[in-house]
Image: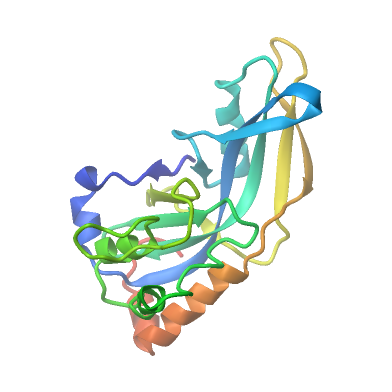
């Protein structure tokens, strides 16, 4: 299932709710690449269909975007799942090999952002802390990251991403099987490390004390 982009105007209740849980999740990111001169490739990420909760959903979404000379990749990616009593927000950092490696580090603002991710903060404030640029209102922001690398989506109760688990990361690459046929896919080892995601989850738990265990029981969706 596709994880739709977060649109503040359409999700005011979710953004005004309190953060109850931060867990490590696994999402599938669809990207397109085009063969260029001299055997090189140029890659661009699809702005309207980026994160999915299953690999097959991402592969099927590629079918409607097929063009001559274009192929697709679907990469397992570690992500953060943020739950409140109202809904679920998913955040991915898909450019670096170790997503979120630079988050909460560096200057004083970055370190304070890490300290403020805990049970009870507003979801809107949490999103501010992960945005690529400082908010005009709060001054928070993730300095030093690429704005196109940070994906923020809203998951439904029927389509929330699964736990990250310990399975190896995989990248699927498409190949054409001819007109009238679905794309074929080959699998290979993925490039991501989950160290950055797990570090943030541990820090959320440390910041929240024992309250995070009780708060998790108030999340209405399966974690």
**Where does the image place residue 71, in percent across and percent down from the top left?**
69, 27
Q: Residue at x 79, y 46 (%)?
A: 188
Say above or below: 68 vs 59: above
Residue 85 seen in render: no
Q: Is residue 142 visible?
A: yes
> Residue drawn 35% across and 56% down?
133
Q: Quadrant of residue 177?
A: top right
Horizontal side of 197 relative to 43 (left or right) equals: left
With respect to residue 35, does 51 lie above or below? below
Q: Is residue 143 above or below residue 47?
A: below
Q: Is residue 187 above or below residue 26?
A: above
Q: Give coordinates of residue 137: x percent, y percent.
A: 19, 60
Residue found at x 19% / y 52%: 12
Q: Is residue 3 left or right of residue 126?
A: right
- The color scheme shown is rainbow
Q: Where does the image place residue 113, in percent across and percent down from the top left?
A: 36, 74
């Amino acid at each position: 299932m596709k994880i739709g982009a977060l649109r503040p105007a359409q999700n005011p209740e979710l953004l005004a709710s309190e953060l109850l849980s931060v867990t490590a999740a696994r999402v599938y990111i669809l990207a397109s690449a085009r063969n260029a001169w001299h055997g090189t490739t140029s890659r661009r990420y699809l702005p309207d269909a980026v994160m999915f909760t299953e690999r097959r959903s991402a592969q099927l979404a590629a079918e409607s975007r097929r063009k001559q000379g274009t192929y697709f990749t679907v990469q397992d990616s570690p992500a953060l799942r943020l739950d409140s009593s109202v809904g679920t927000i998913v955040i991915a950092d898909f450019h670096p090999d170790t997503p979120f490696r630079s988050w909460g580090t560096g200057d004083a603002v970055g370190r304070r952002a890490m300290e403020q991710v805990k049970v009870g903060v507003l979801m809107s404030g949490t999103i501010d802390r992960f945005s690529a640029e400082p908010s005009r209102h709060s001054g928070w922001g993730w300095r030093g990251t690429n704005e196109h690398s940070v994906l923020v989506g809203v998951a439904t109760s029927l389509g929330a991403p699964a736990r990250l688990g310990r399975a190896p990361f995989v990248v699927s690459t498409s190949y054409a099987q001819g007109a009238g046929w679905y794309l074929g896919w080959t699998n290979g080892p993925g490039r991501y490390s989950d160290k950055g995601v797990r570090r943030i989850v541990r820090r959320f738990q440390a910041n929240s004390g024992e309250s995070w265990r009780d708060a998790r029981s108030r999340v209405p969706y399966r974690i």
